[in-house]
Image (cartoon, rainbow, N blue to C red):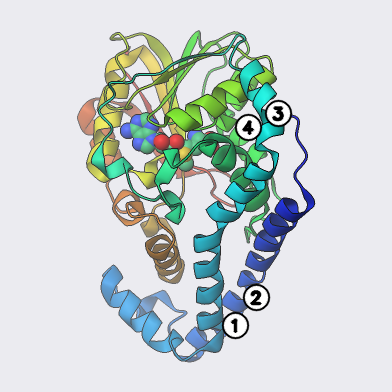
Amino acid sequence: MLDYTLRQSGRASLDFLSAFGCVTPDLVARQNQALKKAGLADDANLADDLDERAKQVEGVLQDVPEFRAANLIAEWHSEQHARLAAEAFDQIADELKPQFEKFKTGKTTLKLDPNLDVPKYWLYPIHRTTGGWDAREGMGFIHGELIHRYVVGKAPRPPAAGSVAADIYAQRDLMTQQAPRRDYKKILEIGCSSGPYTRSLGRNFPEAEIWACDISAAQLEQAQRNGNATGQAWNLFQADGRHTGQADASFDLVTSYIILHELPKQVIADILKESFRILKPGGDLLFGDVAPYREMSKLNAWRTDYAAKFGGEPYWRESSTMDVVAVMKNIGFVDVKYEGVGPTRYPWVTYGRKPA
Ligand SMILES: C[S@@+](CC[C@H](N)C(=O)[O-])C[C@H]1O[C@@H](n2cnc3c(N)ncnc32)[C@H](O)[C@@H]1O
């Protein structure tokens, strides 16, 4: 963790943003009453086709004030969160500079690739952040620290509230616990971003060599600061998870946390294929993400799809409706599992083993 104190106004803006978002569950409860009255709380009355279902549900909700209010809040949230976090960062940027310098060195190393062929699909404004992952100077801190800690970390998460899954940092530990072995020697994380899951991997597998890649230079730089600030030794490198540049059969575990819903389905398939190539025989693949639509009630799937559509998540629908199990088996993985953890069924785990 870097040591910093936000200015009062920066802190207040971010607090307001998260507090404002917390009224949404109440508004959703009121929307559900209207849908129940119209018979649409029942799966049997909702269309299988997602676009048809959207017409049914939104047709009823368009006249419900709580739906319009929730949309306004979501819209405001999407438009403002990165701007307010950037403002909060700018207020303390000069004070952070010495730490940014200091944590460039340490046991966590970073190899950037100035010639990386950045894929087109990745260049979208993630979560409606103007400019995306590498939008501007300090973006690693703005996204990986401020937005994570003060916005995502404080978002309401019913029905998981109070459980471990409600704490975004504990979620990463819960994910590492899903790995079937404790004796891995070499682990690769794909899509590490600013490194919160990398940190859990380092903590939970202290004997393993930890490698992690991402496309975003800004997020990797923040990951390096986090690794060095916590005294961990990670080998960070900038690469597309479809072409890691790593040797065949070189890792015992290839893992990721919440990258799948941000990827087109062909990219997911290509990353799974690359993971199979670099896994040692007998090695494990373990990816954690959100539940697929077919495992939710039809109404919850509509709600997720609606939020993704307007919240800057262009690939959520295709990734949440793809047949991951078939793709995994086709690549050659065995003992494939695709299931949610615990009563909240979060995280949703994709597991497979490369045959020995
Ligand atoms: C939601 S973030 C990952 C979060 C992180 N694992 C954590 O625990 O917070 C998704 C990350 O995937 C990265 N990404 C997207 N496509 C990728 C690809 N093809 N290869 C590697 N990283 C990718 C993005 O740059 C972004 O940093």
Camera-near label (3 vs 4) is 3
In percent of width and height, residue 323 lies at 27, 46
Camera-near label (3 vs 1) is 3
In percent of width and height, residue 198 lies at 55, 25
* Figure quarter occupied by ligand 1: top left
Q: Which residue is mark 3?
A: 2
Which residue does the image show at 45% across and 68% down from the upper left? 303
> Which one is earlier in the sequence, the residue at label 2 or at label 4?
2
Q: CA distance from mark 2 to mark 4?
A: 30 Å
- Where residue 216 sits, quadrant-wise, is top left
Disc number for residue 30? 1
Q: Which residue is mark 4?
A: 173
Residue 219 to residue 249: above or below: below
Which residue does the image show at 65% across and 60% down from the upper left? 156
Q: CA distance from mark 2 to mark 1?
A: 7 Å
Q: Secondary structure at mark 1?
A: helix
